[in-house]
Image (cartoon, helix red, strand yellow):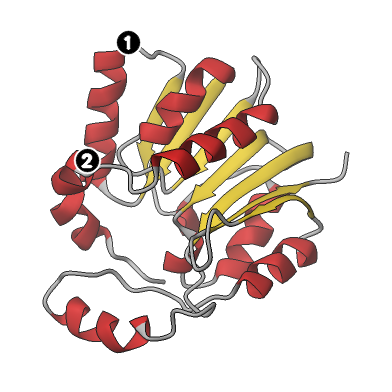
């Protein structure tokens, strides 16, 4: 099991200060996701980072649970929730592999900028699908480095040696789509804002 918590702890404060690279694409992803939320929805965000997205979705859901492998990311997320006065979001440090998901518990699960950082993306998708209620959705945004970005393979190892990059898996969009379907999910949204950008998928569990 990969554990890059030390890397993410080290960069957490800098990560929190960074600007969103593509505000337009981010806004559209929020809007699409919120189409599938209801005022009473139970939402899980795995790999929630510093809590930005979880807090954006909180007004549209009943409760949001945000988890992350990094204790520093979670500390920042809690600070932000307190500052914003948001009371229906809970942040918890946990790796996905050790998280008790339960069965058919959530109306929506978000895995944003996460699946390419996991040791077993297909297995993770299957576990997350099992935690969805019938009709629930798995929302993902994933860097598909096999889709025209194989050159990254040459630079990741030296960056890791000096602590400037986490481990990544080289996935393609077709890998993700196949993983969603193998887990029994139907892809209902499939969008890339531009070539080689992260692939945004919404996959729904049959009702």
Q: Residue at the spot x=24%, y=15% of the render?
A: 83
Front-most of 172 and 78? 172
Q: Which residue is mark 1?
A: 85
**Residue at the extreme right:** 207
Which corner quadrant holds the N terminus? bottom left
Q: Is residue 100 visible?
A: no
Q: Is residue 113 left or right of residue 207?
A: left
Label 1 secondary element: loop
Residue 20 image position (x, y, % from top left): 32, 43
User: Would you place residue 196 above or below residue 74 in this image?
Assistant: below
* Label 2 Cα neighbours within 10 Å, binned few <14 / some 14-19 / many ≥20: some
User: Would you place residue 82 above or below residue 194 in this image?
Assistant: above
Q: Is residue 142 visible?
A: yes
Q: Which residue is mark 2?
A: 16
**Residue at the extreme top:** 85
The earlier-in-sequence mark between 2 and 1 is: 2
């Amino acid at each position: 099991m990969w554990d890059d918590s030390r890397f993410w702890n080290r960069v957490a404060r800098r990560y929190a200060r960074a600007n969103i690279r593509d505000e337009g694409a981010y806004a559209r992803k929020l809007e699409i996701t919120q189409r599938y939320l209801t005022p009473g929805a139970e939402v899980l965000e795995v790999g929630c980072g510093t809590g930005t997205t979880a807090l954006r979705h909180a007004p549209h859901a009943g409760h949001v649970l945000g988890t992350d492998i990094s204790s520093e990311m979670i500390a920042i997320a809690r600070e932000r929730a307190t500052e914003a006065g948001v009371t229906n979001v809970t942040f918890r440090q946990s790796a996905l592999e050790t998280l008790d998901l339960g069965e058919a518990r959530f109306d929506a699960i978000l895995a944003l900028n996460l699946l390419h950082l996991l040791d077993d993306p297909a297995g993770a998708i299957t576990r997350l699908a099992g935690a969805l209620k019938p009709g629930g959705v798995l929302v993902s945004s994933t860097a598909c480095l096999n889709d025209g970005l194989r050159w990254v393979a040459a630079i990741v190892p030296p960056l890791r040696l000096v602590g400037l990059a986490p481990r990544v898996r080289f996935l393609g969009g077709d890998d993700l789509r196949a993983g969603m379907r193998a887990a029994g999910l139907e892809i209902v949204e499939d969008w890339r804002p531009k070539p080689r950008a992260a692939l945004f998928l919404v996959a729904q569990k049959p009702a």
